[in-house]
Amino acid sequence: RVAQIPVDGTTKSPDVCLVEVGGTVGDIESMVFLEAIRQFQFRVGRERCCLVHVSLIPVLGSVGEQKTKPTQHGVKELMSL
């Protein structure tokens, strides 16, 4: 219902609703939010829902090595939704 509330001063329903879920995928604290996103996909239909994963990939030390393991883990967890 909240997604139908206009925020631009008009009475027209929005075309898109963006929801940000912060935190770290896999942490027990974020599991309830990820479950809510999973259930939301079923409610609106997968064809009407798009998940976007944004992740920091740090570059460590003078070697310049990228640490991608946390991002890989996060993507794996989100793909299982």
Image (spheres, helix red, strand yellow):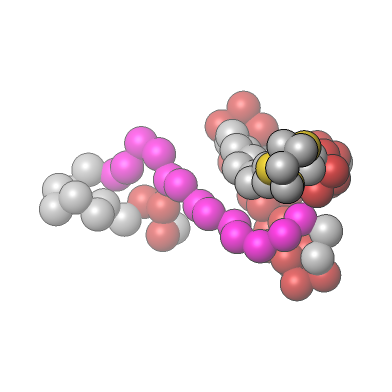
Say which of 32 and 56 sits in front.
56
For this view, does 20 lie left or right of residue 4? right
Q: Quadrant of residue 23?
A: bottom right
Q: Is residue 42 visible?
A: no
User: Is 19 in the magenta?
Assistant: yes
Which quadrant is the N terminus positioned in?
Answer: bottom left
User: Is 55 in the magenta?
Assistant: no
Q: Residue at x 46, y 47 (%)?
A: 18
Instruction: Residue 56: give x, y in percent of width and height.
Output: 64, 46
Magenta residues (range): 13-25
Give the dominant element type of the magenta stretch: helix, strand or loop: loop
For this view, does 69 lie left or right of residue 25? right
Q: Residue at x 72, y 42 (%)?
A: 62
Instruction: Residue 46: give x, y in percent of width and height.
Output: 66, 33
For this view, does 29 lie left or right of residue 56? right
Q: Residue at x 40, y 39 (%)?
A: 16
For this view, does 74 lie left or right of residue 48? right
Q: Residue furthest top?
A: 47
Q: Is residue 21 visible?
A: yes
Say which of 24 and 49 sits in front.
24
Say which of 55 and 22 sits in front.
55
Instruction: Residue 45: give x, y in percent of width and height.
Output: 64, 35
Say which of 12 and 79 sits in front.
79
Which quadrant is the C terminus positioned in?
Answer: top right
Q: Quadrant of residue 33?
A: bottom right
Q: Residue furthest front?
A: 62
**Image position of 79 with respect to 61: above or below:** above
Q: Residue at x 32, y 42 (%)?
A: 14
Instruction: Residue 58: give x, y in percent of width and height.
Output: 68, 46
